[in-house]
Amino acid sequence: MPSNPPVPISESALIVIDVQDSFKARPYWDRRNNPDFERNVERLVASYRDAGLPVVYFLHYDDEPGPFERNGEHYKLMDFLSPRVDEPLYEKTTHNAFTSTSLQYDLLRKGVRRIVVAGIRTEQCCETTTRVASDIGFDVDFVTEATLTFAIPNPETGEELSAEDVAERTEYALRGRFARIATVDAIAAELGTAKAAWAAKSSS
């Protein structure tokens, strides 16, 4: 359950999950939702960098031949992202970002107790990471507008759940139980307020 009040933003990190070219090689890429996804992720990254707080990235791979193959041509971050030398890039094999990586240990070692989640897919790796993070004690902000997903077909009925409905249902499942549903503007404003307070304190 999200903390009330939230853990201070100064003890947070931005988690950018699976924003990789592998998805562009999937036939459903052209049916993605959230046309502002790239811009929103860029804003979060810029806000965290401006505040001097951690940003971490993830790539997901599997052993099957195809777009998520570790040595394949699509296994790389999308071009609009360019991690700095102090921004780690983790490789994972599980839907959540914790189980197959050292993320939990690394965050705690840096004093991080709160995470802000962005990435692909909304209801899969982003939601699963959020649930696990909450269960192991992190305070979580889920920024839906900085996530992206696709419609989910039901092979038994031929019906389809739209990407917009998938995102909405994810919010309903997470809100108040595993995370706060946050906006880019809200996170950027909180970071800006914290940065101003740090500056005032250091100059006094």
Image: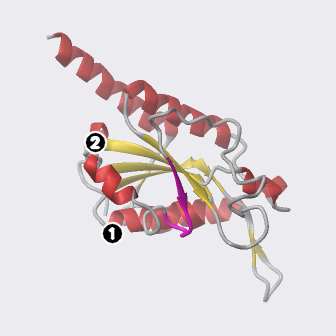
Tell me: residue 34, above or below residue 156: above
Give the residue drawn at x 72%, y 53%.
Answer: 33
Whether residue 69 is visible, yes or no, is yes
Image: magenta residue range: 89-96
Whether residue 6 is visible, yes or no, is no
Give the structural element (helix, strand or loop) at label 1. Answer: helix
Q: Quadrant of the C terminus?
A: top left
Query: Residue 140: x and y, percent?
Result: 37, 54
Give the residue drawn at x 79%, y 66%.
Answer: 66
Mark positioned earlier in the residue sequence (2 or 1): 2
194 lies left or right of 167: left
**How many dots with numbers?**
2
199 lies left or right of 179: left
Q: How is the image coloured?
A: secondary structure
Q: Residues within 10 Å of mark 1 (few under 14, many from 20)?
A: few
Query: Residue 189: x and y, percent?
Result: 41, 30
Quick one: 30 or 144, which is closer to the camera? Answer: 30
Residue 90 - label: none
Query: Residue 19: x and y, percent?
Result: 64, 49
Q: Which residue is mark 1?
A: 135
Give the structural element (helix, strand or loop) at label 2. Answer: helix
Q: Amino acid at mark 2?
A: Glu
Residue projecting furthest to the bottom:
156
3D distance between C-alphas at marks 2 and 1: 18 Å
Looking at the rendering, which quadrant does residue 69 occupy? Answer: bottom right
Q: Are marks 2 and 1 in contact (CB under 8 Å)?
A: no
Q: Which residue is mark 2?
A: 11
Q: Amino acid at mark 1?
A: Asp
